[in-house]
Image (spheres, grey):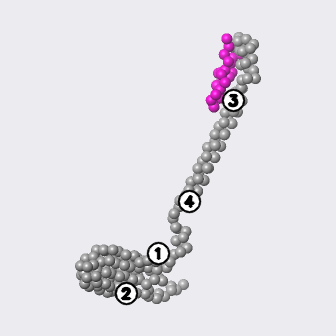
Amino acid sequence: MGITPPKSTTDQPISEEVAEEPAAKRSDTGSGTAATASGAGSTSPSDAASASADRHSLRGALVVGGAMLAACAGLILYGVLDTSKSDDTAEHRVPAAPVTYEVTGEGIADITYQALQTSGKATVAKAATLPWRTTVDVPLDQDPIVNIVLTQQGGQARCTLAIRGQHIQSATATGAFGRATCTSQFPHQEPPES
């Protein structure tokens, strides 16, 4: 009986031992088997190599296409999920100056002050422990202001306001629920010479 090479069901090429049987074996097997081994039903090594190369190039194309699709999806998600406002901030930059607010004394006070905010509302430090100090940027078109309100326990507290490091104003609050406010306008500054 002769050996007929099995048809390949895998992606690997048929090994040369099976595809190329020695001529002596083919002649011994008889005419029917020899025709099957070397006839039209079998594939030659060059056909198998060509089919394997086609499969490999198709796989490569699919891998490259999948990678490109994943990269595009990533870029789209990055654009949708990117919440940074770096482009908007540069366009809407408001001129501002540093202002130092300071409240001295002992105890607790509610402190309200102006700072650079997009909402335009004042910043509130509720029940701040004294002494308290902060330096913030204030838009040049708004007046710097700090307001203090003592608690029911009262006491004494003093607020001060400094613009660009220069002391501008101070005020004192005393007693239960005592109040004091320090405010000023920005001093006119000469434009720099060119």
Which element carries disc 2, helix, strand or loop? strand
Residue at 55% over, 68% down: 87
Q: Specify the label residue 80 is tagged with.
A: 4
x, y percentage for residue 115? Answer: 42, 77
Residue 39 magenta-highlighted? no
Residue at 36%, 85% in the rendered image: 182
Query: What's the amino acid at mark 2?
Result: Ile
Mark 1 and mark 3: Cα distance apart in space: 72 Å
Q: Amino acid at mark 4?
A: Val
Ranked by sequence position, the earlier of labels 1 and 2 is 1
Over which residues does the magenta segment extend? Answer: 1-23
User: What separation in Å lies between label 3 and label 4 (alpha carbons)?
Assistant: 48 Å
Q: Nearer the viewer, residue 55 or 15?
A: 55
Q: Residues within 10 Å of mark 1 (few under 14, many from 20)?
A: few
Mark 4 crowd level (few <14, some 14–19, many ≥20, 10 Å Cα): few
- Residue 139 appears left or right of 74: left
Alpha-carbon span between mark 1 and mark 2: 26 Å
Question: Which of the two discs, 1 and 3, labels the residue nearer the N terminus?
Answer: 3
Q: Is residue 167 visible to the viewer in this orientation of the structure?
A: no
Q: Nearer the viewer, mark 1 or mark 2?
A: 1
Quarter of the image for residue 103 reads bottom left
Q: Which mark is residue 168?
A: 2
Frontmost of labels 1 and 3 is 1
Q: How many marks?
A: 4
Instruction: Report which residue position mark 3 lands on.
Output: 48
Say which mark, if any, is on residue 119: 1
Q: CA distance from mark 4 to mark 2?
A: 47 Å
